[in-house]
Amino acid sequence: MFTGLNVNGIFIYLAGLLTGYLAVRYRLTISDRASQVSDHIKDMEKLHEAAVAFWSSPSDPEKGDDKKIRVLSGLTVFMRIYPAISRMASQKSPHYESLVSEYFRACTGGNFDDPKRQADLPKAVELSNVHAQLVDLLRQIRCDLSSVSMLIEDSINLAKGTWESFNSTFLKP
């Protein structure tokens, strides 16, 4: 039944299958991460619109805090994916984290909670500047996701996770 098959041929076939599986898995992971970064940028655009509208007009006690609520809900959505994007940013993570802090302060700083707040156009301009820097950095991060260094880093992390799982399962003290 298995005449003509040798061990080397089977090994090469299995190595090819494993390589193909890992390549497809890697591509799907990169695609998913790039999609998350793109969604994060879209969420930031909505937050930016709400924050600029908030800071470009005075508070209106008659209408309530609709604009303020839109900014706060935008920040909530923004912060939900923050840890995942920070991990994806790899070496750019410290820069990303500092820009996010600056963006958060630009959105909610100053007289954000003042019911008699006046329009603050310099604040809206500051917000737009930080927003542009953050979007630019996120686009760089999205491009870096498919780099060779990211592949090596992911492979090392996968190996560490596999080793830790093996140790905790089979080599319990």
Image (tube, rainbow, N blue to C red):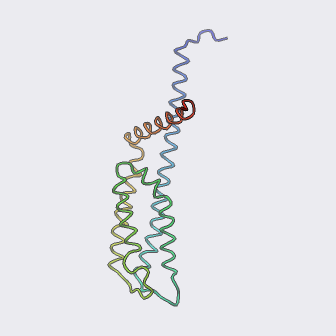
Which sits in the foreground, 171 or 37?
171
| Residue 127 sits above or below residue 97 on the image | below
Name the residue furthest top: 3
| Residue 41 sits above or below residue 153 on the image | below
Q: Is residue 66 left or right of residue 118?
A: right
Rendered location of residue 171, percent (x, y): 54, 30
Classify the position of the C terminus by image quarter.
top right
Classify the position of the N terminus by image quarter.
top right
What residue lies at 48% left-to-right and 78% top-to-bottom? Answer: 68
| Residue 168 sits above or below residue 12 on the image | below
Rendered location of residue 85, percent (x, y): 44, 54
Rendered location of residue 6, percent (x, y): 56, 12
Q: Is residue 7 left or right of residue 99?
A: right
Rendered location of residue 106, percent (x, y): 37, 72
What residue lies at 45% left-to-right and 65% top-to-bottom? Answer: 44
What residue lies at 46% left-to-right and 55% top-to-bottom? Answer: 83
